[in-house]
Image (cartoon, coloured by chain):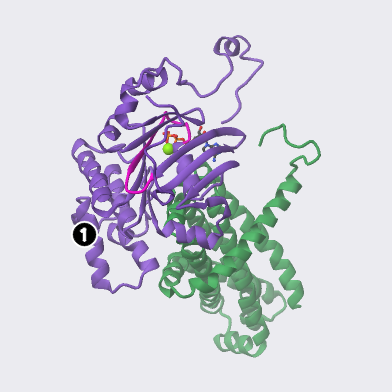
Amino acid sequence: MTSPEHRAAPEAASDIVVAAEDVHFAIGGRRIFSGLTLRARRGRITAVMGPSGTGKTTLLRLITAQAYPDSGRLTVWGRDVTTLRSREVFAMRTRMGMLFQNGALLTDIDVFENVAFPLREHTSLPEPLIRDIVLTKLHAVGLRGAARLMPAELSGGMARRVALARAIVMDPELLIYDEPFVGLDPIALGVILRLIQKMNEALGLTSIVVSHDVHELETIADDSYLISEGRVVASGTPQELGAGGSPIVQQFMSGSPDGPVPFHYPAPDYAAELLDGAAAPGEGP
Amino acid sequence: MSTEGSPIVREGPILRALQHIGATFLFALQLLAQCGPALARPGLIVRQIYNAGARSLIIIMLSGISTGAVLGLQGDNLLQRFGSENYLGIAAAFGLLKELGPVLTALLFAGRAGTALTSEIGMMRATDQLTAMEMMAVDPLRYVAAPRFLGGLIAMPLLTAVFNAVGLYGAQLIGVEEMGVDRGAFWSEMQSSIALADVRESIVKSLVFGFVASLIAVYEGYYSDGTAEGVGLATTRTVVASSVLTLLLDYVLSAVFL
Ligand SMILES: Nc1ncnc2c1ncn2[C@@H]1O[C@H](COP(=O)(O)OP(=O)(O)OP(=O)(O)O)[C@@H](O)[C@H]1O
Ligand SMILES: [Mg+2]
């Protein structure tokens, strides 16, 4: 197992697509990141793992400039995201594809139009070409036959595959996956795993995959990071992580509720709260 | 909101209302800036005119005809007391064009089209569709909000015109066919007394109400928090705010036009 300051072999700066240095971020008064440092290298698959609620989705929001770090430095393709104007943010996003945790397909247009949407917005390709591209991408995720279904008619796993087809339709340089494996049957999961791998090899894509599915990531990731309590607690190749003796890694890999990673959302002492339950009602809905 | 906020600025209802108005105003500016680019996609706007307009047509016609019928009934009753039933046409047209048409259409519009807009956009927020658009470098203000706003803005005067026409037919149906007012008098008195200014008032009012109702509906949906409860609350706020504002503005506009 390696320390959070783990560095891969010497590399050119241009090979770093995403670099977070000592990033701090809080939302709604809750500290999400306190000194997060990680990097994603060009052409590699970087896995970000961590227990639910540690801020994996939040990290993706920072990388895509939907939110900005409070302090620290976050660069994407060498540019500090906090310095980008909105036009530059849009330009940056056209080079990215993002797969949302729940698919986020546009519900008022069908599957075909969903996948065609970025093409129609950003290119003026002739209709037959758009058709060919869209069908190719849908074929890659095995849903060419579903082209004329509406999103409401898809299962959760199908919606995610359509969203993947949409994410790759503009041939992005960086693909970001938020929990791509949740709710997929073993066949679809295998297909998506191979697809992620194939796209990286064939197209030289950079991928960032967020998941708590340690064992799936193990097979495809080049680098992986384990986040807990606002910082990277372990990093390295998945094998290094797996072999590591650190209690945190062991707990996460084996899925035990007891260990350094708290299973509970931060809360006052249980016994104390039970005893004076009448005096201290919990906040929130 | 938490109770441990700043001690000076306590969030009273007035402050919150002011914040809301300010935010809506800023949103309106951003939205209007995107309306120009949105015009490049007439297809999207036409679809929204259909959604806001055509789908409200039935309730607008039903309400129009019953409103007109009531006008015929009560107007005839009142005018008979002065022996001037022949002015029923004027009275009905006056009431419909200047007040009942724009106001009732706006109230129905808020309940039918406004709520649909808010909940639709609210659901798009809740299911990350708006964020997904931003991630595809497409501005949801331009693609989602502006066409819906423009669709509502265009649909309102059309719906008001339908309401007025159907209402007049209803007044004529009761007044002339049932109560025996002279058909010729009904129409000719109306034509000679209703001025272009009255029609203009009807159109201006319906445009203003359409602007307000569509703006509120789109705003509430766009900034609803992405939960089922949040969308429900936003929908309620749409109806309440548009209805109250319609009635307030109606007084202001009537005073301006007189
Ligand atoms: N808008 C918000 N306001 C307040 N807190 C938020 C907000 N969004 C997220 N959080 C908090 O940030 C933390 C991280 O959320 P995030 O969605 O990034 O977790 P995650 O690692 O993606 O979890 P999961 O694996 O369940 O998807 C959570 O504890 C959540 O309560
Ligand atoms: Mg998440």
Identify the residue at image location x=50%, y=48%: A75
Identify the residue at image location x=56%, y=76%: B175
Residue A137, quarter of picture: bottom left
Q: Nearer the viewer, residue A101 or B59?
A: A101
Q: Quadrant of the N terminus of chain A?
A: top left
Name the amino acid, label 1.
Thr
Identify the residue at image location x=51%, y=61%: A88
Horizontal side of residue A61 vs B75, given as left or right: left
Residue A78 locus on image (x, y percent): 48, 52
Q: Nearer the viewer, residue B101 or A208?
A: A208
Horizontal side of residue B119 vs A98, given as left or right: right
Asked whether residue A104 appears in the rendered view, the answer is: yes
Q: Nearer the viewer, residue A217 or B211?
A: A217
Which chain appears purple?
A
Residue B58 locus on image (x, y percent): 44, 66
B218 shown above or below A216 = below
A113 shown above or below A269 = below
Which chain appears green?
B
Per the image, the residue denoted by label 1 is A136
Residue A179 belongs to the span the image colors magenta:
no
Which chain contains the residue that carries disc 1? Answer: A
Give the magenta-colored segment's residue range.
Answer: A41-55
Residue A134, quarter of picture: bottom left
Main SS of residues in magenta: loop
Q: Residues within 10 Å of mark 1 (few under 14, many from 20)?
A: some
Horizontal side of residue A162 vs A249, given as left or right: left
Q: Secondary structure at mark 1?
A: helix
Q: Residue furthest right?
A: B8
Residue A16 locus on image (x, y percent): 41, 47
